[in-house]
Amino acid sequence: MEISFSDKVVIITGGSRGIGKDLVRAFAQANAKVYFTYLTNGEKAQNVVDEFSRRYAATIKANAVDGRSKEDVHNFIETVITENKKIDVLINSAGYIPRGLFLNTSEDVWKNAIESNVSSIYNYCTNVLKYMLLEKGGCIINISSVSAHFPAKGQAAYSASKGAIESLTKALALEYGKYNIRVNTIAPGLVETEVVKTISNQVKQEILKRTPLGRFGRAEDVSNTALFLASENASYITGTQLLVTGGRHLD
Ligand SMILES: NC(=O)c1ccc[n+]([C@@H]2O[C@H](COP(=O)([O-])OP(=O)(O)OC[C@H]3O[C@@H](n4cnc5c(N)ncnc54)[C@H](OP(=O)(O)O)[C@@H]3O)[C@@H](O)[C@H]2O)c1
C-alpha cells in the first residue's frame, strides 16, 4: 500500500530516537514536510535530519521543544504555521517511561510522568487544534501504551499517564469529529528501543512467552500503523485505540 503525504505538514514529537525517529523516517519517505522535536539530544536529532535528508527528498526540521513547556510549544507551533500556514498531522510520541512500585514513586517522578506524557499533549493539542479547525481537517495520533490497558507491576505512574492519554483522545475525537479532525491512539507493546535495554532478560522472556506473534515490536510496526491512521485510508476511523502488541494484550 503506497501512501503519499506530499504537501502535508507533519509534526512528530520526540523524533531524535526510538519510535519517534522511525516515525520521522516513515513520513519523510512518504514525502511529508516533517518537523520533529527533541528534549536535549541535539546531536542525535541532527543525525536524524542528516540521515533521512540524504535518503529522501522531503524537508525535515529538528527543533528543541520541551513538550512540558506551554511557551516552548506555543512558539514552535507559531513557527510552523508562519512557514506553512497549516498543520495536517500531529503525532505525540515523546514520552517519559518511569518504572517503580507505586509507594517508591517520588512526587517528582509522578509529576514528570503527568507533565511529559499528558500535559505535553494538552499543550500541543490546544495549539494545533485551532489551526486544524481553520482548515476544517486534520489528524492527531497519540502514542499510548499497552500499559494503559493492562498495567504491569512497577508501572503505576506510567500506566496512569498513558490511561489519561486514551481518555483524552476519545474526548477530542468526540468534540472535533464534526470538523473532520480525527484523533486516535496507537498503543504499542514492548518495542525494541533504547528504553528496552533497561529491562531485565528474565522480564523480556516472560513478555515474549505471552506474545502470540512471538517477537517484540519494531519501531516500524508503529510507523506503519501511524502512516495508515494518518492517511485517507483511515478517513472513517476516529476515537479508537490500535493495539500494536503482537497480541500480547490477549494473555
Ligand atoms: N519502547 C517501547 O517499548 C514503548 C512501548 C509502548 C509505548 N511506548 C511509547 O512510545 C513513545 C516513544 O517511546 P521510545 O521508546 O521511542 O522512547 P525513547 O527512545 O525514550 O525516546 C523518547 C523521545 O522523546 C523525547 N522527549 C522526552 N521527553 C521530552 C520532552 N519533555 N519534550 C520533548 N521531547 C521529549 C526524547 O528526546 P531526547 O532524545 O532529546 O531525550 C526522545 O526523542 C513514548 O511515548 C513511549 O511511552 C514505547
Image (cartoon, helix red, strand yellow):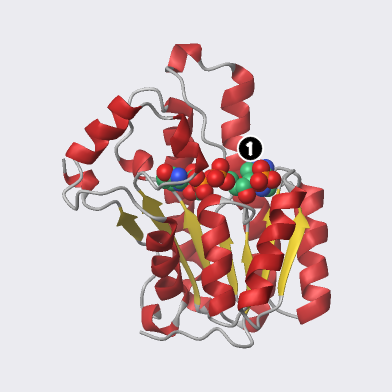
Q: Residue drawn 83% across and 75% down?
A: 82
Residue 120 visible in the picture: no
Q: Quick one: label 1, few (<14), some, or many (20+) residues within 10 Å? A: many
Give amino acid for label 1: Glu
The residue to which callout 1 is attached is 115
Q: Examine the rendered structure and indicate whether residue 225 appears above or below residue 64.
A: below
Indicate the position of residue 133 as horizontal and vertical percent values.
63, 75
Q: Nearer the viewer, residue 202 or 181?
A: 202
Question: Quadrant location of the C terminus?
Answer: top left
- Displayed quadrant of residue 134: bottom right
Q: Secondary structure at mark 1?
A: helix
Residue at horizontal 51%, vertical 71%? 26
Vertical placement of residue 205 versus 136, above or below: above
Q: Point out the image quarter for the N terminus.
A: bottom left
Percent of width and height locating residue 14 = 62, 52
Q: In the rendered image of this protein, does residue 44 appear above or below residue 103? A: below
Q: Is mark 1 within 8 Å of ligand 1?
A: yes
Relative side of 1 to 135, left or right: left
Q: Is residue 250 left or right of residue 61?
A: left
Name the residue rendered at 61%, 76% in the picture: 55
The image shows residue 15 at horizontal and vertical percentages of 62, 56
How many numbered marks have been drawn onto this rendered protein structure?
A: 1
Can you say whether 200 is above or below 101 in the image?
below
Q: Where does residue 159 sit, x and y in percent of width and height?
A: 42, 35
Q: Specify whether residue 122 is in view.
A: yes
User: Which residue occupies 31% across, 47% down?
Assistant: 216
